Image (spheres, grey):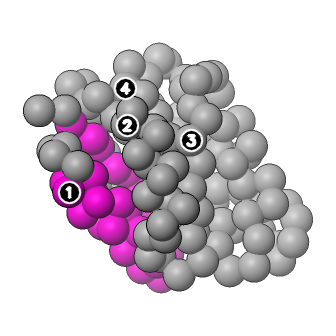
Amino acid sequence: MKKAVIIYNSKKGATKRYAEQISVYLNSKKLTTQVLSIDNYSEEFIQDADYLMLGCWTSGLMVFMQNPEKDWRQFASRLPETLKAKTALFTTYKVLTGSMFKNMRKQLNGKADSCTTEIKSRNGFLSEKDKEAIDAFIG
């Protein structure tokens, strides 16, 4: 059975809820999932993962200068130089995501070059569009 690890950073709970929703959906697709906060991250969690989903909330001004906040940036720096698992990004936001995904990739510093799947939620719930993107991600 394939394994997905979902690692998130949440400020008020929406990103945690989104990570949990992603997990439930992946379980319905017969994947084993593990959901953890960046605070509980250890490299051992991702060693045997087939899929890795990394998420955080959108920090920054209302329409521009969106970035992962400091804790997520520090987490990203602790990831292995090369991520073996197929990797996707997710975020939660209030108004717009703007340059959030670009800046998340920048913080990953080439560790997940093939990371093209991006999903986002304003309320922390999985949409039908998100499910389609996840289906394409897990192939």
Residues in magenta, as a range: 3-28
Q: Residues within 10 Å of mark 2 (few under 14, many from 20)?
A: some
- Horizontal side, residue 114 vs residue 52: left or right: right
Q: Looking at the figure, which quarter contains the C terminus?
A: top left
Instruction: Give the Cα separation between the discs numbered 3 and 1.
Output: 19 Å
Which of the labelled discs sits on residue 5, or is there none? none
Q: Residues within 10 Å of mark 3 (few under 14, many from 20)?
A: some
In the displayed structure, 95 sits above or below 100; it is below
Q: Which residue is mark 1?
A: 28
Whether residue 89 is visible, yes or no, is no
Amino acid bearing label 1: Ser
Magenta stretch encompasses residue 4: yes
Do residues under tags 4 and 2 come within 8 Å of each other at their CB atoms? no
Which of the labelled discs sits on residue 117, or is there none? 3
Q: Looking at the figure, which quarter contains the N terminus?
A: top left
Camera-side residue of 120 and 134: 134
Q: Residues within 10 Å of mark 4 (few under 14, many from 20)?
A: some
Q: Which residue is mark 4?
A: 85
Sequence-wise, the earlier of marks 3 and 1 is: 1
Instruction: Give the Cα separation between the discs numbered 4 and 2.
Output: 11 Å
Sequence-wise, the earlier of marks 2 and 3 is: 3
Mark 4 vs mark 3, foreground winner is: 3
Instruction: Give the Cα separation between the discs numbered 1 and 4.
Output: 20 Å
Sequence-wise, the earlier of marks 2 and 1 is: 1
Residue at point 87% right, 72% down?
A: 63
Element carrying mark 4: loop
Do residues under tags 1 and 4 come within 8 Å of each other at their CB atoms? no
